[in-house]
Image (cartoon, rainbow, N blue to C red):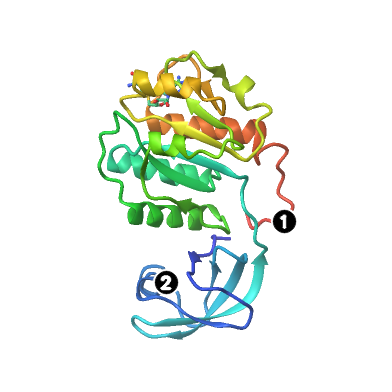
Amino acid sequence: MASKVRLFIDTPLALEQIIELSETQSHYLSNVMKLKLNDKFLGFDGKSGEYELQITQLAKKHLEAKVIQKQKSFQTPPDVWLLFAPVKKDQTDFIIQKAVELGVCKLIPTITRYTISDKTKTERFVAQSIEAAEQCRRVDIPQVLPAKSLSEILSNWDKTRPLYYMDESRTGLPVKDAFSAAPAPIALLVGPEGGFSKEELKLLRQLDFATGVTLGPRILRAETAVVAALSCWQALSGDWVNYKEQNECDF
Ligand code: SAH
């Protein structure tokens, strides 16, 4: 069975309710996905789970749908934050998309000494994260914070949340040692393409809530490091550990 269209709907959903879709979503459902009157699609509001909706009214730019069935209850992924230095546009989109798929619950664009990108458009990051959540069947929407400098973030850090920084000098802990017993809440920090400055590494090494991690012998691009770090953490201490789908699956 082809998988159903799935949309984030920015209004609280409840059974029997009639929902008016935005102009953009109406256009997407009727003109792009070619859905017709009475067709069904999935919707989630980021707070109460996933529902099946049925189209009850279909005009050119105005679509209404009724919430007919609850499909999934609300759940959130483990409490893992990603601090990433924005890179070029496409690679930053990639970072956001993959981080959402890999179950990050908060994204914090972090400006470091060698962050060259000034393209820290929070709105764009939010749109990217919603699209990724729709695609990967999350029922929550990860939070995206406005960009902040690394020094500001570190000076306000809640020390009960361990911070693991990916250290390209490769003198930190091997992933298995770092992540085998590193339950959430945690945060992961990945540097920009230029890497961390000497001063930043010196500062990070002095912080008792921060641990340097080595992602193997090779130097990875920032976006690869994000995917590698999150995958390793999910597999060793996150929600990949012992995961097996309990619900009936449509594929
Ligand atoms: N230009 C730098 C590399 C930066 S790589 C250099 O040549 O040294 C971008 C970011 O990815 C780094 O800041 C680091 O956070 C992460 N990274 C890349 N390879 C890594 C590795 N082998 N171990 C740990 N972190 C790594």
Contact flag, marks 2 and 1 (Cβ < 8 Å): no
Disc number at residue 247?
1
Q: Residue at x 54, y 67 (%)?
A: 45
Where residue 85 sits in the image (x, y, percent)? 36, 36
Q: Quadrant of the C terminus?
A: bottom right
Q: Secondary structure at mark 1?
A: loop
Q: Which quadrant of the structure image shows residue 168?
A: top left
Q: Does residue 16 sit above or below 129 in this rendering?
A: below
Q: Amino acid at mark 2?
A: Leu
Q: Residue at x 44, y 77 (%)?
A: 21
Horizontal side, residue 210 vs residue 246: left or right: left
Q: Residue at x 26, y 38 (%)?
A: 117
**Viewed as shown, does residue 80 lie left or right of 154?**
right
The numbered dot on residue 29 is 2
Residue 192 higher or lower than 110, as above or below: above
Q: Is residue 123 above or below residue 67?
A: above
Whole-number angstrom distance, CA of label 2 to CA of label 1: 27 Å
Give the x, y percent position of residue 129.
44, 53
Displayed-image quarter of ligand 1: top left
- Residue in the picture at 67% in, 63% down: 73
Q: Is residue 38 left or right of residue 91?
A: right
Mark 1 crowdedness (10 Å alpha carbons): few <14, some 14-19, many ≥20:
few
From the top left corner, tell me how far across and down residue 142 is, in percent: 51, 53
